[in-house]
Amino acid sequence: MEKYSGVKFKTIFKEKKKIEHKGIEKLMTWGKKFVELNLAPKIEGGFAGNLSFRTLHGFIITASGANLSELNDDDFVEVIGVDVNLKQIFVCGLKKPSSESFLHHAIYTKRTDINAVFHGHDQITLKFGDKLNFPITEREQPYGSMELADEVVKILNMNCNYFLIKEHGFISLGKTMDEAGNEAIGQHKRVIEINRPDKAAKNK
Ligand SMILES: [Zn+2]
């Protein structure tokens, strides 16, 4: 996979201030859990994952390169506008938003029923995903690109809240952050269970 080298868009700060929202504490908890369960492992330059929830004006997302296992209150950025053509993202906050902000934005636009988008790199579901019929993007695309967001939008449907990005990772969705988080853990455990040596032998 492509090496992480920061965001691929221009961040325009509408307001440079610390973001306050009652949902932030919950997002901190889920960041920690994702790292503990290896759903968002540490990589060079940051962590392989980004989490967000919908707000009145857009969504609040973890900052680019944030330490998900120890999120501080300045590690949250509210994305309030996206200009796809100019590759600009308008934010309130103190840091740049996650490199996958285009992806989160595209999902919130298409799935109006969803209020939380969690993305991570779960090697287990990625490896065995084809056996479980998870929807998976067709073509591999560079991280943080519009092309990646477009690929994901193609496979989004209303009946499924867990998707794989080819050679990359997963996205779990929920009406709440707990729903999105538990979906990611549930699918992770399901794949481990199915691949237990005794079960795997029986399924042959
Ligand atoms: Zn990723």
Image (cartoon, helix red, strand yellow):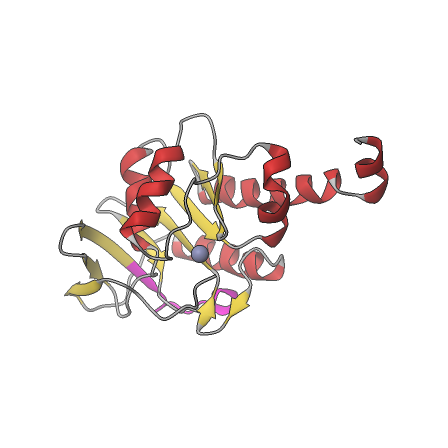
Q: Quadrant of residue 187?
A: top right
Q: Is residue 72 left or right of residue 147?
A: right
Q: Can see residue 104?
A: no
The image quadrant in which ligand 1 is located: bottom left
- Looking at the rendering, the stretch of residues picked out in magenta corresponds to 68-77
Q: Is residue 28 left or right of residue 108?
A: right
Q: Quadrant of residue 45?
A: bottom left
* Image spot of residue 7 (x, y percent): 30, 65
Q: Can see residue 174?
A: yes
Q: Is residue 28 left or right of residue 5?
A: right
Residue 69: in magenta span: yes
Residue for point 40% across, 26% down: 158
Judged from this view, the residue extending furthest toward the bottom is 45
Vertical comparison of 32 with 59: above or below:
below
Judged from this view, the residue extending furthest toward the top is 159
* Image spot of residue 127 (x, y percent): 62, 48
Q: In this orientation, which residue lies closer to the viewer: 139 or 196?
A: 139
Quadrant (top left, top right, bottom left, bottom right) of the C terminus? top right
Judged from this view, the residue extending furthest toward the front is 139
Q: In this orientation, which residue lies closer to the viewer: 54 or 131?
A: 131
* Image spot of residue 34 (x, y percent): 55, 56
Residue 92: in magenta span: no
Residue for point 45% across, 67% down: 71
Vertical comparison of 95 with 151: above or below:
below
Q: Is residue 120 left or right of residue 123?
A: left
* Image spot of residue 28 (x, y percent): 47, 59
Residue for point 55% across, 63% down: 41
